[in-house]
Amino acid sequence: MRRLSRDAVRGLRLTAAAGLAVLLSLATSLGTTSGQFAATAKATTTSSTRAACTTGAPYALLLATPAYAPSLWWRFANLTGTTTVADASGSGATGTVVNAGLTFGAANAGLITCDTTYAMRQPGTAAATGFVTTTTATTSPSVFSIATWVRTAALTGGRIAGFSSSSAAGSALQDRALLLDRSGRVVFQVATTSGNVLLTGPTAISDNVVHLVVATFDGTTMSLYVDGAKVGTALVAAPAAPYAGFWRCGWDQNVATLIPTARNQANVRQDEFAVWQGKALTASDVSTLWASNHW
């Protein structure tokens, strides 16, 4: 057998060492992403600078497939001055803009990768009363999921989206909601026969980075996800009785009764609000939603 020269052996050793160093580097990097929000900023930066949008399964294409099709899907791809928001789900659940203050258009860039349209901004001031609402009443679903992308740096708290008994003004009944508390943590609210269950994320998302927030309820268990990871669950022993209502994004009254001193509208830029009525997304489903915007 022919022996390798001393230089050839040295070259192979250097190549192997370099490969091992790369593997160790990758292992260390992957290990640090196990925290719920640790990889968010990096993932967002990577996705926003990626040039190719024709590979993978972009979020908008994923929600257009039958397996992930929502019951309502407001993409907020609207121009300034809009009075209605199209429903991309095909269900005809067009949103109507009520009151002033919400802004759309080029000043509010879309929050998902490969989306060249816009998002909606909720100002979240004390006097802000703008919201987008469905106009045909439906019965509050006993099983559901809601998802939306948000970006905020505010610590004023407030309502992002949810189900309410009114499509014209403040609601007597409101629940199935996503809110922010005054420390910047996301809160999932479900009403019961004796009050409310509030499921709060452990870490603030008010870091001016894009986050995917998903809330699911299977009739007994609430689950809250942030950036594809489950961050909490809670049991609801006696959900409130069904009532006729509307899906809304933005303002509703009496949020401070749930979160002390919080405002009635959150200060967020919001995009791609989706509702699945009669379906509780699984952890795998949510992971796929997140991954579709960060491949």
Image (cartoon, rainbow, N blue to C red):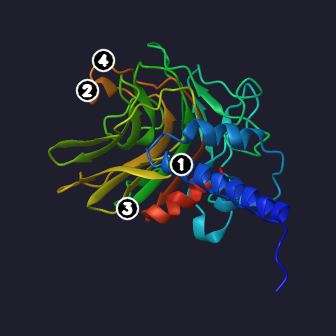
Q: In this figure, which residue is indicated by the disc labeled 2?
A: 257
Local secondary structure at mark 2: helix
Of residues 137 and 160, the one drawn nearer to the viewer in this rendering: 160
Q: Are marks 4 and 2 in contact (CB under 8 Å)?
A: no
The disc, 3 or 4, on the residue closer to the chain's N-terminal end is 3
The disc, 3 or 2, on the residue closer to the chain's N-terminal end is 3
Local secondary structure at mark 3: loop
Amino acid of disc 3: Val
Q: Is 137 rendered above or below residue 195?
A: below
Residue 143 is tagged as 3
Q: Are marks 2 and 1 in contact (CB under 8 Å)?
A: no
Q: Are marks 3 and 2 in contact (CB under 8 Å)?
A: no
C-alpha gap between disc 2 and disc 1:
45 Å
Foreground mark, 4 or 1, reads: 1
C-alpha gap between disc 4 and disc 2:
8 Å
Q: Is 241 rendered above or below residue 247?
A: below
Q: In this figure, which residue is indicated by the disc labeled 1?
A: 28
Foreground mark, 3 or 1, reads: 1
Residue found 51% across the figure and 26% down from its top: 207
Question: Mark 4: few, some, or many residues within 10 Å (few <14, many ≥20)?
Answer: some
Residue found 25% across the figure and 26% down from its top: 257
Q: Is residue 93 left or right of residue 169?
A: right
Q: Position of residue 68 (x, y in %)?
A: 59, 65
Q: In this figure, which residue is indicated by the disc labeled 4?
A: 261
Question: Mark 2: few, some, or many residues within 10 Å (few <14, many ≥20)?
Answer: few
